[in-house]
Image (cartoon, rainbow, N blue to C red):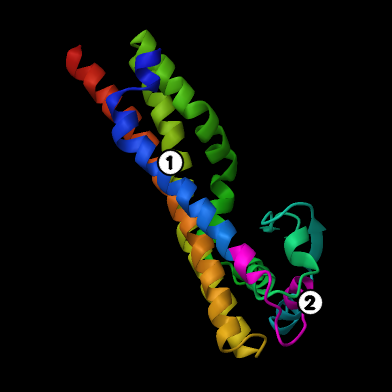
Amino acid sequence: MGYFYMDQYYIILVVPAVLISLIASIRVKGTFNKYKQIGNSKNMTGADVARYLLQVNGIYDVRVTRVSGELTDHYDPRKKELRLSDSTYSSMSVAAVGVAAHETGHAIQHNVSYGPLALRSYLVPVANLGSQAGPTLAILGLVMSWSVLINIGLLLFAVAVLFYLVTLPVEFNASRRAIESLNKYNILAGTELKAAKKVLSAAAMTYVASALVAIANFLRLLLLARNRSDRD
């Protein structure tokens, strides 16, 4: 079993991807912490911005609620809830405003039936199963030399990888909508808008890094499966 957890592909593919992911995570936290010290000139909280942007976009059936933690902000399309973390909800920082606008971008995507968001929502159940069970089944198949189990594991994991890839345009589009809205409605301008862009750009890199980790793990299992097939 140890071979399959610390093989050459793990070192070549997975380790660098994990390091990139760690760097991206550290960067987004550092950028957020830097700009959460700077208030916005309109004195609007993250919740104020979210509610205002929902209103001007004609969205009246989405609730803005508070969720514990820092950078745990997310939009739930099933319950139509825009959940802002403790670090965003009542904060007037440019970082909080940027994050709140980004999450509102997801609500706007949902309202206009943005294709990639709908696809991501459909993939969630299978992707959750695939990310948890896929690698385990594939490795068990490799250990037991059972091709059917390997293929099932790889197929499930492939759906999880697809979810990560679909997430990228969803997140980048939400950030674009956020910056455009903050500028259009004069919520942020000048250096404040530039600061929000930096926060959202750093956050976007965490999604890219997560996709890289998923792809690296999938390629590793695929290469191990191919090597086993070549030996048979």
Instruction: State left or right for residue 148 relative to residue 81.
Output: left
Instruction: State left or right for residue 66 relative to residue 152.
Output: right
Real-space Cα separation, disc 2 to disc 1, in angstroms: 36 Å
Residue nearer the viewer, 42 or 37: 37
> Mark 2 or mark 1, which is nearer to you?
1
User: Which residue corresponds to the image point at 67% horizontal and 76% vertical from the top-left?
Assistant: 38
Residue nearer the viewer, 119 or 207: 207
190 in relation to 28, above or below? below
| Quarter-of-image position of residue 7 | top left
* Percent of width and height locating residue 167: 50, 55
Residue nearer the viewer, 57 or 71: 71
* Percent of width and height locating residue 9: 29, 29
* Percent of width and height locating residue 93: 70, 74
Do we see residue 194 in this rendering?
yes
Q: Which residue is mark 2?
A: 48
Do we see residue 177 in this rendering?
no
Look at label 2 and name its amino acid.
Asp
Q: Residues within 10 Å of mark 1 (few under 14, many from 20)?
A: some
46 in relation to 137, above or below? below
Residue range of the region highlighted in magenta in the rendering:
32-51
Q: Residues within 10 Å of mark 2 (few under 14, many from 20)?
A: some
User: Which residue corresponds to the image point at 60% horizontal and 40% vertical from the top-left?
Assistant: 125
Judged from the image, the secondary structure of the residue bearing numbered disc 2 is: helix
User: Which residue corresponds to the image point at 65% horizontal and 66% vertical from the top-left?
Assistant: 103
* Percent of width and height locating residue 201: 49, 67
